């Protein structure tokens, strides 16, 4: 799974965004970022996961330094735009229809049909500092990422 990337350089990518532009991970170099992969716009677990990021978005932005939030799934940009508008999400959603980026990050598909949900905390140097797979715990993953960032910003090391 994605945990194999911890301590490694996060793979760069370029994907289309709900902001009507293409976004690369390199666009966020020199910033902390959370890259989270989710299965499907509108599915109950993914909806809760995205809403949890929305609820904590201002906190992510108020951290020192601020942490950017980026969501990725296989859904089309049209589906992403509808989902983003419905939930009033303040962060970009990126479309990865062929799962090339998900595969580069080691995000698996369970039983051949259910994409996993994984979140990655990536440093300004593009190093992956933390990974949390949140298959059935969409609310807990945001708290774990905030805790990981807090530990790192206090000088701790992630394992």
Image: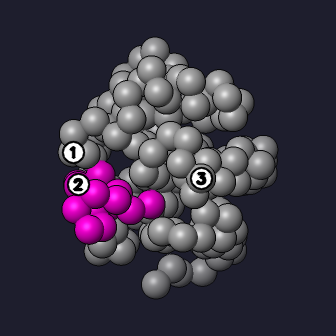
Color encoding of the figure: one colour
Alpha-carbon span between mark 1 and mark 3: 24 Å
Q: Which residue is mark 2?
A: 104
- Can you give x and y, in whole percent of width and height, for residue 84 in the image? 60, 30
Identify the image quadrant of residue 9: bottom left
Q: Residues within 10 Å of mark 2 (few under 14, many from 20)?
A: some
Question: In front here: 138 or 65?
Answer: 138
At a point 48% along the width and 68% down the height, the residue shown is: 135
* Residue 128 shown left or right of residue 143 in the figure: left
| Contact (Cβ within 8 Å) of mark 1 with mark 2 | yes
* Residue found 53% across the figure and 23% down from its top: 81
Asked if the stretch drawn in magenta spans residue 113, the answer is yes
Instruction: Say above or below: 90 vs 112.
Output: above
Which residue, as the protein is rendered here, is positioned at the far top?
20
Q: Which badge, 1 or 3, is on the more N-terminal residue?
A: 3
The residue lying at 46 percent from left, 84 percent from top is: 159
Q: Is residue 99 magenta?
A: no
Circle on res. 100: 1
Percent of width and height locating residue 44:
59, 53
Q: Residues within 10 Å of mark 3 (few under 14, many from 20)?
A: few
Residue at numbered disc 3? 44
- From the viewer's perspective, tell me whether residue 120 is left or right of residue 103: right
């Amino acid at each position: 799974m994605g945990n194999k990337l911890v301590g490694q350089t996060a793979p760069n990518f370029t994907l289309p965004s709900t902001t009507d532009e293409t976004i690369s991970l390199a666009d966020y170099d020199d910033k902390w970022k959370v890259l989270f992969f989710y299965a499907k716009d509108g599915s109950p677990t993914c909806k809760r996961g995205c809403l949890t990021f929305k609820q904590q978005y201002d906190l992510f932005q108020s951290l020192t330094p601020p942490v950017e939030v980026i969501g990725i799934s296989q859904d089309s940009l049209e589906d992403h735009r509808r989902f983003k508008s419905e939930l009033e999400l303040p962060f970009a959603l990126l479309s990865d229809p062929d799962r090339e980026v998900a595969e580069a990050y080691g995000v698996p598909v369970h039983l051949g049909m259910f994409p996993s949900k994984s979140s990655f905390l990536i440093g300004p140097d593009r190093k992956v500092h933390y990974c949390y797979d949140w298959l059935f715990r969409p609310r807990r993953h945001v708290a774990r990422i905030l805790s990981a960032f807090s530990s790192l910003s206090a000088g701790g090391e992630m394992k």
